[in-house]
Amino acid sequence: MKFVLRGYRSPSPIPSLGGGTIRYKPVIPMTVIGPRTQETPFVLVDPGSDDIVFPMALAQRIGLDLSQAPQRQSQGVGTSQPVPVFYAPVILLLSDSIQTVRWRATVGFVAVVLRFSLFGIAGGLQFFRTTLDGVRELEIIPDASLPVTQDSVP
């Protein structure tokens, strides 16, 4: 699957970009399917993120009950202080209009403001080979170990 990198304009020149004002980021749409409904937020493909992480509000909208969800503390998710991350199973769908993959994953939910949800390693990037081509495109190739499913709910 191939995705064109998205450009994000900075209000002032960026020294590391030689004064340029646009940063290109691997931000792609990913569908999250819960018991009630589904949504397609944009996620930042982040091999530095241990987990796939979405905002708590998304869990509520797709019908997840996190009252008994396993949780742990994590740092670096929208804040420098540790925050609780609640884990729940979902079905994820990734598509580039040519190829579509759909798999089960346990993902994290946090009650902090995120600029982008995170497409991290556990349950996500561990199943893909990714190649970032400068400021042009991101290629994501599913591995044979991807736990594909056609189920409609987690």
Image (cartoon, grey):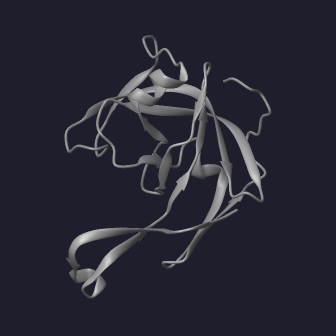
Q: Is residue 101 left or right of residue 6?
A: right
Q: Residue at x 77, y 56 (%)?
A: 99
What is the count of numbered marks?
0
Q: Is residue 55 left or right of residue 40?
A: left
Q: Residue at x 24, y 85 (%)?
A: 19
Q: Nearer the viewer, residue 136 or 81?
A: 136
Q: From the top left corner, tell me how far across and down residue 91 is, in percent.
A: 65, 33
Name the image quarter holding residue 60.
top left
Name the image quarter holding residue 53.
top left
Q: Which part of the image, by quadrant, shows the N terminus?
A: bottom right
Q: Is residue 143 left or right of residue 21?
A: right
Looking at the image, residue 74 lies above or below residue 49? above
Looking at the image, residue 96 lies above or below residue 5? above
Q: Residue at x 53, y 49 (%)?
A: 121
Q: From the top left corner, tell me how far across and down residue 54 is, in percent.
A: 44, 37
Q: From the top left corner, tell me how far across and down residue 127 is, in percent.
A: 66, 50
Q: Residue at x 49, y 49 (%)?
A: 42
